[in-house]
Image (cartoon, rainbow, N blue to C red):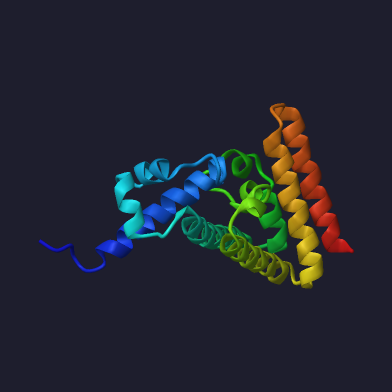
Amino acid sequence: MPYPIGHKIKVRNKIIESAAQAFRTKGIHDVSVPFIMKGAGLTHGGFYAHFDNKEQLVAEACRHAISDTIALLQEVADQETQNPKINTVIDYYLSPHHRDKTEMGCIIPTLSGEISRSSEDARQVFAHELERMISFISNLAEIDVSKGSALFSTMVGSLVLARSVNDPELSGNLLYAGKQYAKELLKT
């Protein structure tokens, strides 16, 4: 009996979602195809019916994760009615919640350190998605892309450092300092 129409797309999307969650949490190199497939509730053997290789999945998961993050940050911004929306996004991005919920958070801080060792295709997709994120931040803040790049770089760097340390006080201080500096960038 054949599968219903759209079944293959649904399965592919489950694999992409599983990969995005795994890559956000553990990075690319520490995540195996069997781990991703298990997270999608599937067997390893079905992977190649959907993807040529892991690098293709990295690119697709990156696209998916950035789209999720932009949608989430837009939702956060849309809830703000009094303060500048960009400040609300900065506060959310550099919050303990976002720091600790890596499986749902922005994929850029996790992949930035290792994407340079990925395929050219994956790197190209990552670069495009990074530009899309910077454009989103720049538009939300109503600043040019150069300043948006500096702002987002500050946010990502602060989050990476806050996630890297095991001292909760230091981590919190890094988030706080990142928020303050990011908001100061907007004033110049």
In the rendered image, which quarter is residue 120 located in?
bottom right
**What is the x, y in percent for residue 181?**
83, 51
Residue beneath the point at 41% across and 40% down: 35
Question: Which is more toward the observer, 64 or 93?
Answer: 64
Residue beneath the point at 44% across and 56% down: 53
Question: Which is more toward the observer, 184 or 147?
Answer: 147
**What is the x, y in percent for residue 20?**
49, 51
Q: Is residue 169 visible?
A: yes
Residue beneath the point at 22% across and 69% down: 5
Q: Is residue 102 visible?
A: no
Q: Is residue 63 above or below residue 171?
A: below
Question: Which is more toward the observer, 122 or 152?
Answer: 122
Residue beneath the point at 55% across and 43% down: 29
55 left or right of 17 in image? right
Q: Where does the N terminus fall, quadrant-wise?
A: bottom left
In the rendered image, which quarter is residue 6 located in?
bottom left
**What is the x, y in percent for residue 166?**
69, 27
Total number of numbered labels? 0
Q: Which residue, as the protein is rendered here, is positioned at the far right?
A: 188
**What is the x, y in percent for residue 33?**
42, 45
100 left or right of 156 in image? left
